Image (cartoon, rainbow, N blue to C red):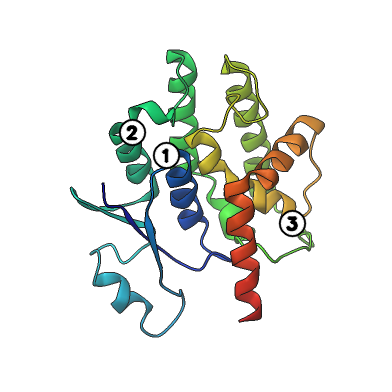
Amino acid sequence: MSLHLIIGDKLLSSWSLRGALALDLVGAPYTEELIKLNQPDTRERLLRHSPTGKVPLLKTEHGTIADSLAIAEYLAEQFPDAGLWPKDIAARAQARSACAQMHAGFFAMRGSMPFDLSRDTPLSLTPADVQADIERMLALWAECRAAATEPGPFLFGGATLADAFFAPIAVRLRTYQVKLPAADEAYVNTIYQWPAFKAWQKAGLEEVAQ
């Protein structure tokens, strides 16, 4: 199967990170094309591939798939033996629910804590709505761990699409120096030690020097 992932800057594009981590979970070969964001020709270049004008985009033999959640579901369908979702029905339902909540919410956190792999500075003031988002996020992670039926350091034991979706949140919590309970700090450390994430992080930080 031919897979071609179109992404934005690795330093700044949280949604692109999700798509890349999902593909890593599959283990299938794919090609990658990076379109720099916030450039005069960015939208024009993206529109050549999709009418959404957004990343990530996955080009497949079945057409171009826009949106990280749609990409995730497509990959789970095409590679059923890759274990992208938890095997247990209840855990799988919780994983899907958590990803959907992440995908459609937490706007205060996103707005006040932009994704930037190179950042290492706390917020000078954490607005109440951002704090509420952080607390809800940690509660959501706890709900995932409670539903897990397999051992391991990720939300559901082994790495799944849920971890691909929450990796950018782990980055925000780390780069904005948010104080976390031990279990959540351990999970952030797990994301930062994930080989696929480490490779993305390395490439993103190299963009700073370019």
Residue, x 69% and y 39% (percent of image)? Answer: 190
Q: Where is residue 14 in the image (x, y as percent from the top left)?
A: 52, 56
Q: Do the residues labelled 2 and 1 touch (CB within 8 Å)?
A: yes
* Mark toward the viewer: 3 or 1: 1
Residue, x 19% and y 50% (percent of image)? Answer: 61
- The secondary element bearing badge 2 is classed as loop
- Marks 2 and 1, how far apart in space? 7 Å
- Among the two numbered marks 2 and 1 on one chain, the one whose residue lies closer to the N terminus: 1
**Tag 3 residue:** 176
- The secondary element bearing badge 3 is classed as loop
- Marks 3 and 2, how far apart in space? 36 Å
Amino acid type at circle 2 is Phe
Which numbered circle lies on residue 79? 2
Residue extending farthest bottom: 40
Give the class, few, some or many, for how many residues have Cα within 10 Å of label 1's Cα (few <14, many ≥20): many
* Mark toward the viewer: 3 or 2: 2
Q: Position of residue 98 (x, y in %)?
A: 50, 32
Amino acid type at circle 3 is Tyr
